[in-house]
Image (tube, rainbow, N blue to C red):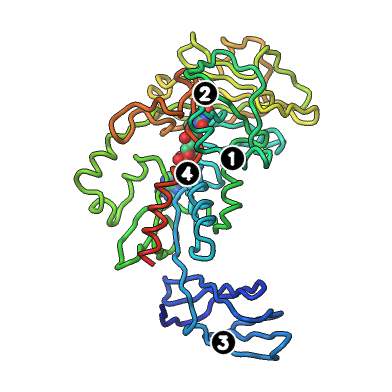
Amino acid sequence: MTQEFNEIVGCKTKCNLIRTEFKFSDKHRRWVHVLVGQQYTELCNSGRSIILKSYRCRISLLRIYFFAILMSRVLIVGAGLTGSVCACLLRREMPNKVSIVVWDKARGAGGRMSTSRSPSDPNCTADLGAQYITATPYYAKTHRSFYDELLAHGILKPLVAPVEGMLMKEEGLRNFVTPRGSSSIVKHYLRESGAEVCFDHHITHIYQKGASWEVQRKGGEAEHFDAVVLTMPTPQLLQLQGDVPSLIEGGPRQKLESVSYSSRYALGLFYSAGVRIDVPWAAKYIADNPCVRFISVDDKKRNVESSTSGPSLVVHTSVAFGAEHLEAAEKDVGCLVLAELKKVLPGLPEPVSVKVQKWRYSQVRAELNGGTPSGTGSRVAQGGAVGATLPLPRTLHRSFARRSLTTA
Ligand SMILES: Cc1cc2nc3c(=O)[nH]c(=O)nc-3n(C[C@H](O)[C@H](O)[C@H](O)COP(=O)(O)OP(=O)(O)OC[C@H]3O[C@@H](n4cnc5c(N)ncnc54)[C@H](O)[C@@H]3O)c2cc1C
């Protein structure tokens, strides 16, 4: 396939592979990999040509557009678990065939697997979303390669610290924690994907333009992609404008609108080094408080207690409290939760800082087919902070990969 371009924007070389970015119009750029036969030591870009300086031939001039193998440019919206695993699988199954870009509106990776740092100590961290990963016997088997990989990299470790009140709904469940915080899972997959990851990129409109998609974001230029994968919670997907409303008109919209999420707040309390939180558990589900549902001494839960960094505490509110105070000011909610926390843990020391996080879309309450999330492997603990399964189904990934190829 050949296509006229206006300019070569940039190029890099590695062995006999040249990675070049072409500009077809102001808004349309593509990365292309071109294989050449020799080892090149130097290359420079002069408008519509790339000049190669090699060991064997002193200077050769390559007019790329006759040889260009155009790569599919795929945008993945969302740098959470789904987006990062999707990017990684795409890269592994289609090396050198896709150029992967990930955009997220947040300032960092993780989504609902985010890890917050104490403003006064970057080593004092707290997981404000997902708390632990649970492998049911079914998923431990079908997703074995994912678990093996994360365990081999030290990203997952078995949960050994005591968690009070955890209901094991199935025989043979295995729980894992993330010593470097839950966002380390997402960061691992993003790293593996080699994707170009951009934060502060809030997608607002998507338009279909022939075989490609024009994606608009807040405060930035629109860009074109061959395929777009949306991984945000369903209500945020339904907020997208442009051609999205007409593309999902009718049945698909109705189905998507039937998906609902619970809302809850999370608080991260950060302490100075040397402070002790004197409780006999690492995490606990609270059954008799209208506000506080779950507490975790995060460094203890992750088995990474240290004398040089302070401990951190995570508090999750009940869903009922989350719904009642959804539109309240976060500062006021923080004060209410801290007051209730003192009733649950009267001797708790004063933290050096507190972070309040509202999870408007916390966990799925009603699934796409109208069911409640349950069963085959996803849920563990009693109605509190409970689990998603790790990766995307491979079949879904495969069919996506095929589609994106055919649109290229
Ligand atoms: C309080 C809480 C406790 C939990 N406990 C557990 C647990 O113990 N174990 C477990 O396994 N799971 C748990 N979960 C669930 C788990 O965190 C999620 O299932 C998982 O993180 C979802 O990942 P995701 O990538 O699908 O979605 P998300 O993590 O929500 O990622 C979506 C991303 O899309 C971005 N985005 C949204 N809209 C746009 C837009 N318009 N433009 C650009 N970017 C956008 C968001 O910023 C976000 O980063 C918990 C969740 C919460 C909130």
Mark toward the viewer: 2 or 1: 1
Indicate the quadrant containing the C terminus: top left, top right, bottom left or bottom right.
Answer: bottom left
Mark toward the viewer: 3 or 2: 3
Is residue 377 positioned above or below 13 on the image? above
Viewer-proximal residue among 302 and 167: 167
Amino acid tagged 3: Leu
Amino acid tagged 1: Ser
- The CA span between labels 4 and 3 is 40 Å
Amino acid tagged 2: His
The tag earlier along the polypeptide, 4 or 1, is: 4
Q: Determine whether label 3 and label 2 are within 8 Å by CB.
A: no
Answer with the quarter of the image where residue 215 lies.
bottom left
Tell me which residue sits at (45%, 82%) in the image. 6
Answer with the quarter of the image where residue 341 lies.
top right
The tag earlier along the polypeptide, 3 or 1, is: 3
Amino acid tagged 4: Thr
- The CA span between labels 3 and 1 is 43 Å
- The CA span between labels 3 and 2 is 60 Å
Rate crowding at label 3 as few (under 14), some (14 to 19) or many (20 or more) other CA atoms within 10 Å: some
The residue that label 2 is drawn on is 316
The residue that label 4 is drawn on is 82
Pinpoint residue 245: horizontal percent, then vertical percent: 26, 50
The residue that label 1 is drawn on is 183
User: For the residue labelled by badge 3, is the local secondary structure a helix, a strand or a loop?
Assistant: strand
